[in-house]
């Protein structure tokens, strides 16, 4: 588990953006028990790189308990929090976690929908005992200083894509998450504490040869309510070669990206700025 350290001490260090007027109501909603769900997921991954999963089987009692424990942790004195591990660079805690069964189930639905052979060709990367996955808790405290920004929004976590295969997000009912649509428009995702949101990551964009879209997203601060989010980042073993799956490519189609290992990409990603297009370094035809 990785627990992030809140840091809003100096408002001047953070970026602002123009307000987004409307909540976006077009987020694809996937009933994980729907036999047609696999096709809906694939369309969502192509169009948005993002979707919401309902009827997932995780009880609200469990989710509420996890959220309560997170709130308790972030309220602890700094000295107590540091006993769980150093806060920098990635937060308190450790990375020894098991696979996320919901993420694995969704990946198996995708494998089935894409007709790429064995259903565990994707989920097996997360179930591998050497899987480089992590679970993160983020705390975005209330930010009353927003009153001084003359109507602009304070960006709590800057725009970025996730480098992993897939990410699973659950948050409390405080809004803040935004995604970027294909046309470059930023839209606010309606909060739903009873559901899970899935992000396509950079590695998955490469594996589908650009068919799936690694979604650019960010989080805005709130002046009235704090936000707690829980994210599972599904990554393969470090030695896994990331390349376009031949089973998704058409005859004669060339890979858009150079082959690389997950370890190589991870190192590259963490040596770039948060909002950089990290995949650009691995494009075969960049600049042509």
Image (spheres, rainbow, N blue to C red):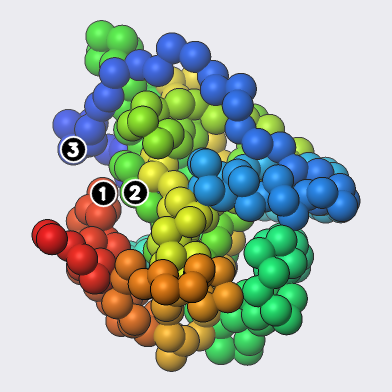
Left or right of 271 in this view: 244 = right
Give the class, few, some or many, for how many residues have Cα within 10 Å of label 3's Cα (few <14, many ≥20): few
The Cα–Cα distance between marks 1 and 3, rounded to whole angstroms, is 16 Å
User: Would residue 91 be visible to someone looking at this image?
Assistant: no
Identify the residue position indicated by label 1 in the image.
Answer: 275
Q: Residues within 10 Å of mark 1 (few under 14, many from 20)?
A: few
Specify the farthest residue to the left.
287
Residue 283 disc label? none
Mark 2 and mark 1: span between their CA atoms?
A: 5 Å
Q: Which residue is mark 3?
A: 13
User: Relative to 32, is 43 on the left or the right?
Assistant: left
Q: Against 9, is 222 above or below?
A: above
Residue 182 in the image: x percent, y percent?
A: 40, 36
Residue shown at 31%/27% (left/top)? 154
Q: Quadrant of the C terminus?
A: bottom left
In this view of the protein, which residue sits in the foreground, 62 or 240?
240
Secondary element under disc 3, as helix, strand or loop, is helix
Q: What secondary structure is found at the residue carrying circle 1?
A: loop
Q: Is residue 113 left or right of residue 44?
A: right
Looking at marks 1 and 3 on the same chain, the residue that comes earlier in the sequence is marked by: 3
Residue at horizontal 65%, vertical 80%?
Answer: 121
Q: Residue 160: which numbered mark, if any? A: 2
């Amino acid at each position: 588990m990785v627990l992030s350290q809140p840091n809003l001490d100096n408002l001047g260090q953070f970026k602002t953006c123009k307000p987004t007027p409307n909540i976006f109501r077009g987020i694809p909603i996937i009933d994980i028990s729907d036999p047609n769900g696999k096709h809906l997921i694939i369309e969502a991954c192509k169009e948005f790189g993002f979707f919401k999963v309902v009827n997932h089987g995780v009880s609200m009692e469990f989710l509420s308990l996890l959220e309560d424990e997170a709130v308790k942790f972030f309220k602890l004195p700094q000295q107590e929090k540091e006993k769980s591990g150093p806060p920098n660079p990635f937060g308190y805690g450790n990375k020894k976690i098991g696979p996320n069964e919901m993420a694995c189930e969704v990946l198996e639905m995708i494998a089935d929908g894409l007709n790429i052979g064995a259903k565990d060709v994707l989920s097996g990367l997360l179930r591998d005992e050497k899987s480089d996955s992590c679970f993160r808790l983020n705390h975005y405290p209330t930010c009353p200083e927003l009153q001084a920004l003359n109507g602009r929004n304070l960006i709590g976590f800057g725009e970025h894509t996730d480098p992993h295969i897939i990410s699973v997000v659950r948050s409390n009912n405080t809004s803040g998450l935004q995604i970027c649509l294909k046309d470059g428009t930023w839209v606010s995702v309606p909060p739903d504490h009873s559901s899970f949101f899935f992000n396509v990551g950079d590695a998955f964009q490469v594996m589908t040869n650009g068919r799936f879209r690694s979604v650019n997203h960010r989080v805005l601060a709130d002046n009235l309510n704090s936000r707690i989010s829980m994210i599972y980042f599904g990554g393969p073993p470090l030695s896994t070669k990331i390349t376009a799956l031949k089973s998704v490519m058409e005859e004669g189609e060339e890979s858009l990206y150079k082959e690389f290992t997950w370890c190589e990409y991870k190192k590259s990603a963490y040596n770039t700025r948060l909002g950089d297009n990290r995949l650009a370094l691995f494009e075969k035809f960049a600049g042509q």
